[in-house]
Amino acid sequence: MEGVDILPHERSKTQFDVDAMKIVWAGSRHAFEVSDRMARLVASDPAFQKDNRSRLGRKELFKNTLRKATYAWKRILELRLTEEEAGRLRFFVDEPAFTDLHWGMFVPAIKGQGTEEQQQKWLPLAYKMQIIGCYAQTELGHGSNVQGLETTATFDPDKDEFVIHSPTLTSSKWWPGGLGKVSTHAVVYARLITNGEEHGVHGFIVQLRSLDDHMPLPGITIGDIGMKFGNGAYNTMDNGVLTFDHVRIPRNQMLMRVLQVTSEGKCVQSNVPRQLIYGTMVFVRQTIVADASSALSRAVCIATRYSAVRRQFGSQDGVETQVIDYKTQQNRLFPLLASAYAFRFVGEWLKWLYTDVTQRLQANDFSTLPEAHACTAGLKSLTTTATADAIEECRKLCGGHGYLCASGLPELFAVYVPACTYEGDNVVLLLQVARFLMKTVSQLGSGKKPIGTTAYLGRVQDLMQCRCEVQTVGIIYSINAAEDWLKPSVMLEAFEARSARMCVARAQNLGKFANPEDGFAELSADLVEAAVAHCQLIVVSKFLDKLQQDIPGNGVKQQLQNLCYIYALNLLHKHLGDFLSTGCITPKQASLANDQLRSLYSQVRPNAIALVDAFNYTDHYLGSVLGRYDGNVYPKLYEEAWKDPLNDSVLPDGYNEYIRPLLKQQLHNSRL
Ligand SMILES: CCCCCCCCCC/C=C\C/C=C/C(=O)SCCNC(=O)CCNC(=O)[C@H](O)C(C)(C)COP(=O)(O)OP(=O)(O)OC[C@H]1O[C@@H](n2cnc3c(N)ncnc32)[C@H](O)[C@@H]1OP(=O)(O)O
Ligand SMILES: Cc1cc2nc3c(=O)[nH]c(=O)nc-3n(C[C@H](O)[C@H](O)[C@H](O)COP(=O)(O)OP(=O)(O)OC[C@H]3O[C@@H](n4cnc5c(N)ncnc54)[C@H](O)[C@@H]3O)c2cc1C
């Protein structure tokens, strides 16, 4: 069987209702319908063509992005799309642009940190795109350490204005997307100074460019920071540099939900916590988790379809084996497929958590903010690291062809990998989680019961005390056969115990230091491992929770169960050292877990193609010859090669200048 016959044959083996799975993946029938409609709209419009991106020079590429982004906006208005539809449309256009920062950070910053009055003034302008905004926080010399920013905003009571200034080279704003060439406004983060006193970092709405001729306003120097990793990729974005030379803005352009500055320069703290200044980052980190499942599922879809099409080495009847049938391929690919689903569900849960904390904040209940910060920071870190690694693994799973731009994977990797850095470097964010965990553990003795995602720390403490005498044989008695690993309570207990024990051990080690900050710095690598264990537990537990829900559709729940256990057992295998060294499981139980994992791979194998079809990606969105829905890989790959500009002529440019003289010289020499 060849090419176009393979994937239909694979689909005929499916053991579950793919349409029902599409709805589970999308989150609801409504979400599925919106996504499906928007994906088709984009795919069918030649204006959104994207297959030439990697061949364009920077200027052409950027102009092309401007064209697409403004055309997308025109369509949004013409079709009167809802906010949800517009978001999906932009998602399927699949090209990083200034609009991401305008809608994703500038608008949320004003919503989250602006007073009612400020929102009323600025949001209508932003909603109509009469102003375009970006989020200017990071500086050349300071990114992770927000409190270390150098830009100043000094209040001048005589004029009732702030003076925004960049005192040093390192205080130049550096990186903000949309800043370099497009934004008319920015939310700029700067140290507030009133009456000679410092009051920490705050956000200010600053106009950067004239609304008439787009020229930078007096005192403002602005430009693009230059080419970034990869062809095409994130180079569609104008990440920018910006300096201020005593730029004046009215007092009412400081975002004042957290702190108000009066006309005398007095600071009045409102009743919301200072950390709300970081609120936009919490919002975006939450969206990044949902995005991780999109990027990962896209790579996995390409690698899975291609693994079914690709054959290597013989079998007895002379037909080569589909590479997807090799256990090694399954062992690399299926955990990534499982991760895509796992990240989808944890992303759904995180969205719920974010909505919940937002509602509480509106009601002046700030109690869940630290947990929301820890969860968004930790899950952002976990899912983006795993996704970036997974995209690269998918490229390798596609062999040599994965290295071609036509596979879609190099560009996907190049666009995706900065997610490990932006919105908080992943290690820095895990250290935040570790601080939160250490604080929680330190309060256990005081009788304060941990809640939410840390509730298990209270429970497992009890467990550790009452079962300490059997620790050498593992704390989980009930695993005596491979199938025992398929019990939700067993899986949860193993992940909870591992994380709790790692946290408690780290806290005990910290206690040995006279100065806790010295201890934290010295043990930071170990602390990061505990934070990872905690975040992995959250993902596993939210996947298990999902399975408790009513999931309609023939065979759908069974498939999700298989994926959930593949996700968890693969993690267990990868982090076996943690599970064994903390005495949570025995080597025998670990070996049973591996047996179970292999058996699950066999159950997923006939459903693999349908499980990636359930993502409902159009060929346009996938942007991959290897991942085509019809599996017609080789003819299309062959066709694609001829489109390369090098093939425009038989003889390359430079033949007469370089190749011909070289060959002639060799000929001449050989005749001597
Ligand atoms: C509508 C469509 C949506 C589409 C979305 C589109 C998304 C577009 C994506 C585009 C791609 C890229 C854009 C990229 C943008 C950026 O990168 S913006 C810049 C991001 N920068 C960072 O993330 C910097 C990272 N650093 C920090 O966050 C903080 O400085 C840090 C967490 C490291 C804290 O450092 P410290 O100095 O220790 O902390 P301090 O300021 O003193 O505060 C300590 C205290 O505060 C708590 N805390 C910290 N952060 C938060 C938070 N975000 N929320 C709540 N609480 C927070 C911390 O836990 C401490 O609490 P404690 O109780 O005192 O222990
Ligand atoms: C594509 C892209 C888009 C971006 N868009 C924007 C934007 O729109 N607006 C904006 O304001 N910013 C933006 N940024 C900037 C981004 O937020 C920062 O790059 C990010 O916060 C990391 O900060 P940094 O670059 O200073 O890294 P650094 O903090 O300098 O990190 C360097 C290394 O030091 C390590 N490190 C740092 N601190 C610690 C610590 N305390 N303990 C242990 N290790 C540590 C890190 O793990 C890392 O390995 C963007 C960045 C990129 C790449």
Image (tube, grey):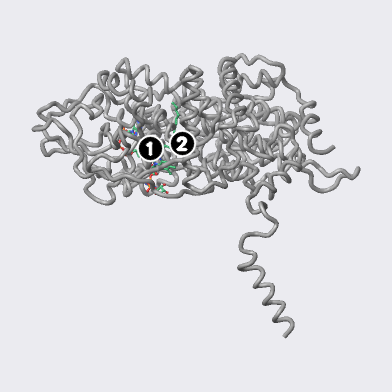
For badge 1, the amino acid type reads Val
The residue closer to the viewer here, 542 or 465, is 542
Q: Based on the displayed image, in which of its 4 quarters is residue 594 positioned?
A: top right
Residue 536 shown left or right of residue 324 in the figure:
left
Say whether residue 512 is visible: no
Q: Check disc 2 and report the residue beneath it.
A: 66
Say whether residue 564 is visible: yes
Q: Position of residue 583 (x, y in %)?
A: 55, 39
Label 2 vs label 1: CA separation? 9 Å
Q: Position of residue 317 (x, y in %)?
A: 91, 42
Q: Position of residue 216 (x, y in %)?
A: 29, 40
What residue do we see at 33% from left, 32% from top? 278
The mark nearer the N terminus, 2 or 1, is 2
Q: Quadrant of the C terminus?
A: bottom right
> Dot 1 surroundings within 10 Å: few (below 14), some, or many (20 or more)?
many
Residue farthest right in this picture: 317
Q: Based on the displayed image, in which of its 4 quarters is residue 589 positioned?
A: top right
Q: Check disc 1 and report the residue beneath it.
A: 182
Q: Quadrant of the N terminus?
A: top right
What residue do we see at 16% from left, 32% from top? 161
Give the image quadrant in which the ligand numbered 2 is located.
top left
| SS of the residue under disc 2 | helix
| SS of the residue under disc 1 | loop
